[in-house]
């Protein structure tokens, strides 16, 4: 590592600070809003002049938010699980086996990744209405799996291509059964890629807004972002700023935790393992 | 196991340039079947949710079909498309969308490149910078949109004082600028990550050699780094352009599409889920799909962008 001069350190340090500040200011603002009392909302200072937890207690005790939160978690987890399993199978085949149609699969995935969601939401709304899937968990899980698969396949096939598959043969030569070779040698190598893919897919499902508002209508299946979009607040005379801000912070906390703990994985996944460290 | 090679048929003799393909061995056939089997679930789900609905959308777009009057449904050919393409709303939405795409992608390219350089080369605090910079990427889009909306609301927001509390979100020009700001804030990190992957492919030795030869940092950047990053830049541009064209969440929350700030997706949503007009809505969806396809084709054919994953040659 080259020795850095003090000026260089100050320069890079300053650039770091600017980047961090720009990234965090809107987040801090919504946190600050969530703690403001109803009267302080009309006061445009960045930090609350009067603090209150009322916004949080308000939304965390109402079913119009708790239920959507549960929906988000449940639908996200199930969709992620299915998508990662299917994507792993396909990515394993792409990375390891020879068969015609590989380019077609990649092409299809890319095509779907580029689809405008509104073009899909339009017919899906009608189809789900007819099939009775509208406003149900499967009604969201299936589109999430289908649109999350391209991300999953792309990320996983990049990871799987990096695995030295000869290790499996070497383990077999050393006397391991096929199952042992897979579990002891290949699985630990594949696990990081699968964890990363799961995180990316879950973030995608958690974040989605368009499908959530078009394919649901009640708290039966509405996810948290969709519920927030239609929040009306505690009474009809009160702008729901505080409630929405509190809700926003609540659904952001898992994201922050994910990013904090898995930053390296996420960066590696998005850059397909091309960046070291 | 086959032990005899198949006789050369007349068909194979007719094309001397073609490789003579022996029948695939048992092992190769097994591999193929396994490959198809493993891909089957993913392909089935993807096709079921995209191919069929798109076909259905094309069918719907040729009908006059309003949900509040289903008994009036009838085949009307291309008149829905004619109605959309001759509507000033459509062209305004297209104009707004194109402006947003061009401006936001341009800004993101510059800022993303700066951020990529920072994340890649900063001397200390690399982990911290990368973590905090990922937060905009991970945050739910509408959370950020609400944050911006409240920031610009008169008497509530810390930024609205910059505009003398004149409610910038209610005027088309400033509202579109704010939408672009929200888009840029959210996705610059993603652009930076894609560019950082490209940065890592530039060989360090080349840059060192150039420095020894007396090139300044500016020259090193423009003459070595950027040309070597061209594939990564084009891929990043492709993804971001397609994403930006589909913009929806930010506009929905920030302005709801009012005051002339609606994009094509917002217009489509309004016609479909507020107006319940499936015929027009489907026609719009297909038109948006065609526009996206045109953009992708321009990038891939025109700029020679390598579609990611196309280098999977095994």
Image (cartoon, grey):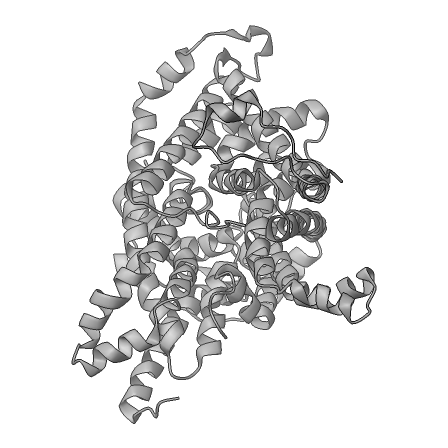
Quadrant, the N terminus of chain A: bottom left
Q: Is residue A38 visible?
A: no
In this orientation, which residue lies closer to the viewer: A134 or B220?
B220
The residue under the point 64% across, 43% down is: A145
In this orientation, which residue lies closer to the viewer: A36 or B237?
B237
Residue A165: x %, y % from top left: 65, 62
In this orientation, which residue lies closer to the viewer: A258 or A2?
A2
Residue B55: x %, y % from top left: 55, 22
Residue B118's quadrant in the figure?
A: bottom left
Residue B124's quadrant in the figure?
A: bottom left
Residue B230: x %, y % from top left: 31, 56
* Image label count: 0
The residue under the point 71% across, 51% down is: A81
In this orientation, which residue lies closer to the viewer: B175 or B1?
B1
- Examine the rendered structure and indicate whether residue B77 appears above or below residue A4: above
The residue under the point 59% across, 46% down is: A148
Q: Is residue A23 visible?
A: yes
Residue B267: x %, y % from top left: 41, 31
């Amino acid at each position: 590592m080259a020795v850095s001069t003090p000026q260089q350190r100050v320069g890079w340090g300053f650039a770091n600070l600017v980047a961090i500040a720009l990234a965090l200011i809107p987040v801090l603002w919504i946190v600050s809003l969530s703690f403001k009392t109803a009267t302080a909302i009309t006061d445009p200072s960045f930090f609350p002049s009067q603090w209150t937890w009322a916004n949080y207690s308000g939304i965390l005790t109402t079913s119009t938010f708790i239920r959507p939160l549960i929906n988000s978690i449940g639908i996200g987890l199930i969709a992620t699980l299915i998508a990662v399993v299917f994507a792993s199978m396909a990515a394993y085949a792409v990375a390891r086996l020879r068969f015609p149609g590989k380019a077609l699969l990649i092409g299809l995935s890319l095509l779907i990744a580029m689809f405008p969601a509104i073009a899909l939401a339009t017919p899906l709304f009608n189809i789900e209405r007819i099939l009775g899937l509208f406003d149900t968990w499967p009604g969201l899980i299936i589109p999430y799996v289908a649109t999350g698969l391209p991300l999953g396949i792309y990320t996983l096939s990049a990871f799987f291509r990096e695995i030295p598959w000869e290790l499996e043969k070497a383990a077999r030569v050393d006397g391991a059964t096929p199952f042992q070779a897979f579990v002891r040698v290949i699985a630990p190598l594949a696990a990081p890629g699968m964890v990363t893919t799961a995180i990316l897919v879950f973030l995608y499902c958690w974040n989605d807004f368009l499908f959530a508002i078009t394919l649901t209508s009640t708290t039966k299946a509405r996810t948290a972002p969709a519920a927030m979009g239609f929040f009306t607040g505690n009474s009809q005379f009160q702008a729901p700023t505080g409630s929405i801000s509190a809700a926003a912070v609540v659904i952001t906390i898992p994201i922050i935790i994910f990013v904090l703990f898995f930053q390296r994985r996420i960066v590696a996944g998005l850059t397909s393992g091309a960046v070291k460290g | 196991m086959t032990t005899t090679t198949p006789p050369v048929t007349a068909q194979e003799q007719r094309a001397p340039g073609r490789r003579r393909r022996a029948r695939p061995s048992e092992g190769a056939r097994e591999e193929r079947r396994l490959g198809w089997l493993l891909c089957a679930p993913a392909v089935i789900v993807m096709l079921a949710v995209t191919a069929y609905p798109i076909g259905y959308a094309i069918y719907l777009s040729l009908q006059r079909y309003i949900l509040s009057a289903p008994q009036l449904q009838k085949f009307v050919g291309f008149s829905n498309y004619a109605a959309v393409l001759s509507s000033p709303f459509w062209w305004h939405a297209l104009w707004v969308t194109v402006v947003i795409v061009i401006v936001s992608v341009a800004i993101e390219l510059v800022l993303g490149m700066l951020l990529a350089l920072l994340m890649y080369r900063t001397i200390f605090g690399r982990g911290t910078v990368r973590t905090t910079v990922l937060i905009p990427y991970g945050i739910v889009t509408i959370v950020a949109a609400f944050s911006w909306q409240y920031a610009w609301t008169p008497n509530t927001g810390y930024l609205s004082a910059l505009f003398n509390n004149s409610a910038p979100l209610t005027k088309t020009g400033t509202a579109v600028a704010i939408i672009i700001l929200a888009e840029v804030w959210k996705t610059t990190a993603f652009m930076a990550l894609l560019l950082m992957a490209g940065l890592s492919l530039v060989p360090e030795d080349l840059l060192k050699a150039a420095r020894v030869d007396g090139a300044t940092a500016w020259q090193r950047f423009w003459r070595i780094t950027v040309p070597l990053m061209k594939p990564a830049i084009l891929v990043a541009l492709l993804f971001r352009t397609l994403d930006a064209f589909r913009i929806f969440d930010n506009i929905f929350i920030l302005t709801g599409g009012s005051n002339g700030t609606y994009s094509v997706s917002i217009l489509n949503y309004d016609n479909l889920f507020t107006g319940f007009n499936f015929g027009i809505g489907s026609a719009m969806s297909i038109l948006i799909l065609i526009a996206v396809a045109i953009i992708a084709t321009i990038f891939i054919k025109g700029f020679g962008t390598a579609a990611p994953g196309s280098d999977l040659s095994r």
